[in-house]
Amino acid sequence: MYDSSDVIGVKVLARNDGKHRYTIKGHLEISSGIGKKDIHTFVEEEILANSTRLVRASDSAQLECNRSSVKNICRNGPFSALLQSFSIGKKEITAVLTLDGQTISTLKVTAVLFPLKLMCGIVLLLTAVIILSLAFSKKQISADTPSDRLSK
């Protein structure tokens, strides 16, 4: 579960266990529960024999690491894509790698987005309002009942 305002870093690694160099293509699909689908193509990468390489998405899936909201996640290393969404609900992130036009690998990850920070703020605000209203109602009750009327 992620906060709906968080930036999600996606890493896609391509591994070549063969003896020849390959050129990898593909795309990253981000689909939500309401049917919206964003597609970001991967930059063509050459994978050398017996090596692993990070596959980078096109500029449409990148965020500037200079922004203060993204600096923390940028410290965790290079990513294929940095995604930010202010939506609520389930997101499916699918990476599809192709070689010579044929799909060779597909990986799907599901993330649930919920406004956790907003909900915590609302709970704290409601708690403060309840505590203050109880404190003021007790003062008003004690002011309405004078203690000098014990006997008549």
Image (cartoon, rainbow, N blue to C red):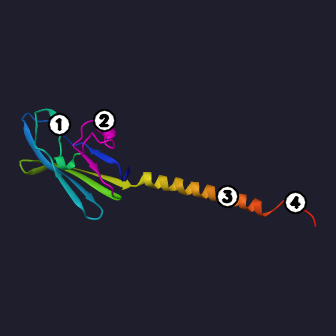
Q: Which residue is mark 2?
A: 75
- SS at mark 3? helix
Q: Is disc 3 in contact with disc 1, using a CB cutoff of under 8 Å?
A: no
Q: Is residue 79 left or right of residue 90?
A: left
Q: Mainly helix, strand or loop, the magenta region?
A: loop
- Distance from disc 3 to disc 1, alpha carbons, whole Å, reads 64 Å
Q: Which residue is mark 1?
A: 53
Q: Which residue is mark 3?
A: 136
- SS at mark 4? loop
* Type of the residue with mark 1: Arg
Question: Can residue 97 be spotted in the picture?
Answer: no
Q: Position of residue 68 (x, y in %)?
A: 33, 41
* Type of the residue with mark 4: Asp
Q: Earlier in the sequence, mark 4 or mark 2?
A: 2
Q: Earlier in the sequence, mark 3 or mark 2?
A: 2
Q: Nearer the viewer, mark 4 or mark 2?
A: 4
The answer to whether residue 16 is above or below residue 97 is above
- Distance from disc 3 to disc 4, alpha carbons, whole Å, reads 22 Å
**Residue 148 has which mark?**
4
- Distance from disc 4 to disc 2, alpha carbons, whole Å, reads 69 Å
* Type of the residue with mark 2: Arg
Q: Nearer the viewer, mark 3 or mark 1?
A: 3
Q: Which residue is at a point 17% across and 47% down the rendered structure image?
A: 59
Q: Nearer the viewer, mark 4 or mark 1?
A: 4
The magenta segment is 63-86
* Type of the residue with mark 3: Phe
Please say whether residue 65 is one of the residues in the magenta stretch. Answer: yes
Q: Which quadrant of the view contains residue 34?
A: bottom left
